[in-house]
Amino acid sequence: MWVDAICIDQRNVQERNSQVRLMPAIYRQAKRVLAYLGETTSDSDLGMEFILEDSRWPSDQPTRPSVGLGPGITSSPQQMAVDNILKRPYFERIWILQEIELARDIWIVLGDKEIDWESFSRTVFYVDMNKQLNFGSSYRSVLPTVVFYRDKSTVNKPETLLQFLNDTRQCKSTDPCDKVFALLNMSTERDEPALAPNYDLSPKEVFTSAARFFITRDKNLDVLCHAQAAPSAYDVPSWVTDWSMPRVSRVLGQPKTSPRPLKADRSEILASIGFGKDFETLVVKGRAFDIVCQVGLEYCAGRDVSTTVRQWEGMLQSVRRYPSTADLKNAFMDTLIAYPPYKGLNRFSIFYPAWRSAMFDEPFESSDSNSEGARALFQKYVNKACNARRFFVTAKGYIGLGPPEVQDGHLVTVLLGGQVPFILSKQQEKFRLVGECYVHGLMDGEAFSEDGVEIDEFHIK
């Protein structure tokens, strides 16, 4: 027998152990799930009325209701009302993913107004696209990723637990363990005993067990790309990701696509990965390739970044000749967007002059009427690669992008099983993981291309 309806709102307490396993079946059996966003506010009726009005029009209809934006108009009551709806606590909850992904039919309810999820998601995407057209490359979307989870046309939709964890990094949960447990039933690892929900474990134990599971099963270090050196409230080892902490920078080494696009470790060399007796020390092998000797300002997208990029350029003066075959100008350009080496010549290089002209207010002569579009496109990729990262120069003259915590004296390593190089800091006899990095000229196995390369062992705590 089908359940008539389920009402889920942000005030519900988290389910525990066996109850967590029952939730998917309940969502699938319900004829309708009601996602309750809360009571009305001064502008919520305006936002819902606009969404309801727009939902009555075909998606390709050019005469759809205006969101109130246009040339010179970057804000409107309708747009702000829709934004405020998307900022409600419901869209921050990690548990809504199961509701959205698994329910047969789901409806948004706000006050006395309701709308089906498909119409709601289509319209808020329409509003977001209007803002992108008006704001250009400076616009940072407030659209929650989960809005597209029921859309069958969504590309690169998460399947594995690690992909879900990466996608939902900004979501919140009352219990930090739910950042893992709430995603299990949607992932390909739903039946893995090692990951089964157990609320007797501490957040440190849950996060550490998940990291060990990925490393042991996959025999690679992809999960390390998600770890960051910022202090954890739960004192996890440096190689373990504290999934309760949001991450600002885009992960370099773990995209949703496969196969793994980067191979700094030279994939034909077998990875040797183990753990210490305490199971909190990661034992890996690789090459200590270089040392960081200069670190630049942190890049913060959305602010005036021209000073930051100019300072980075100034650091190039210490590099007389780039160690790899690329010339320094192209190396810097590729580094700004972390351009993958397997794609050959940087196909975005034609946009670089227009971007540089706008960045530094320099003269730029072009007959191309779309130079603004070229600048905006290059800026988009710079923001993706550089945001919340620092530029650095190594003792051997390599340049790269590293985490905000990178410092002079840190070690640039290429670890077997790692898509990308990693920054390590020496802590007595052991090391701490500072984070993943992009190093131009080290992203395609170059660290192991020489004969007789010495392989080191690293104990990372």
Image (cartoon, rainbow, N blue to C red):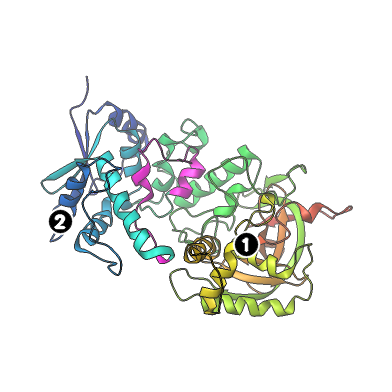
**Which mark is nearer the camera, 1 or 2?**
1
Q: Where is residue 353 in the image (x, y as percent from the top left)?
A: 59, 69
Q: Name the residue under label 1.
A: 349
The magenta segment? 138-167
Give 177 or 160, whichever is nearer the viewer. 160
Q: What residue type is labelled 2?
A: Leu
Q: Residue at x 41, y 34 (%)?
A: 185
Mark 1 secondary-structure assignment: helix
Quadrant where the N terminus is found in the figure: top left
- Residue 148 magenta-drawn? yes
Q: Position of residue 280 (x, y in %)?
A: 60, 52
Give 409 or 319, whichever is nearer the viewer. 319
Q: Residue at x 46, y 36 (%)?
A: 187
C-alpha distance separating marks 1 and 2: 45 Å
Q: Is the magenta stretch mostly helix, strand or loop?
A: loop
Q: Quadrant of residue 152?
A: top left
Mark 2 secondary-structure assignment: helix
Q: Where is residue 120 in the image (x, y as percent from the top left)?
A: 25, 44
Give 37 or 203, whichever is nearer the viewer. 37
Q: In this view, does 366 lie above or below 262?
A: below
Quadrant where the C terminus is found in the figure: bottom right
442 relative position to 209: left or right: right
Q: Which residue is drawn at 58% across and 53% down?
A: 225
Q: Name the residue under label 2.
A: 46
Answer whether residue 427 is visible to the viewer in this image.
no
